[in-house]
Image (cartoon, helix red, strand yellow):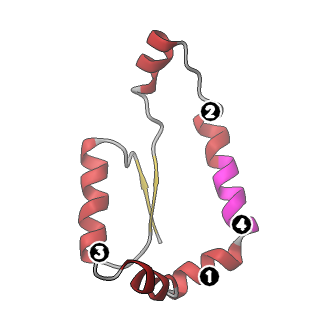
Amino acid sequence: MILVTGGAGFIGSNSVLDRLAESDEPVLTLDKLTYASEIEHELGWEPAETFETGIQKTVRWYIEHQDWVAHVQSGAYRDWLQTNYAGR
């Protein structure tokens, strides 16, 4: 699995797309979304999580769900994708 930080920006998102085109390896993208400060200011929106607590919860989830991680790493999901999305 590849971890890409800053994957929502122009360079990061294109790096993710390039990687996905070259490999079947899963990609996890994390982004602090610093442009969200404009949303916070203009709309009064506040994120439910800080970047730090979001990372902590994400890492904890992966540690607690290692069976899911192993399933994804095995490539078994490809059969499901082929069955459900082939030919679309």
| Cβ–Cβ under 8 Å for marks 1 and 2 | no
Element under label 2? loop
Q: Please give the name of the residue rendered at 24% of the width and 75% of the height, measured from the top-left corner.
A: 22
Give coordinates of residue 67: x percent, y percent. Answer: 70, 79
Task: Find residue 65 and report its image quarter.
Answer: bottom right
Magenta region, main secondary structure: helix
For residue 63, which numbered disc appears in the image? 4
Q: Which mark is residue 50?
A: 2
Q: Note whether 21 is above or below 58 in the view shown.
A: below
The residue shown at (44%, 10%) is 42
- Magenta stretch: includes residue 60: yes
Residue at position x 40%, y 77% in the image: 25
* Circle 3 residues within 10 Å: few <14, some 14–19, many ≥20: few
Q: Nearer the viewer, mark 2 or mark 3?
A: 3
- Give the mark nearest the N terminus, 3 or 4: 4
Please determine whether, in this image, residue 83 is positioned above or below residue 85: below
Alpha carbon of mark 3 to alpha carbon of mark 4: how far? 34 Å
Q: In which quarter of the image is residue 29?
A: bottom left
Between discs 1 and 2, the one toward the N terminus: 2
Residue at numbered disc 1: 70
Answer whether labels 4 and 1 touch (C-beta < 8 Å).
Answer: no
Q: Nearer the viewer, residue 4 or 74?
A: 74
**C-alpha gap between disc 4 and disc 2:** 20 Å
Q: Which amino acid does label 4 sit on?
A: Ile
Q: Report which quarter residue 48 is drawn in.
A: top right
Range shown magenta: 56-64
State the residue position of label 3: 88
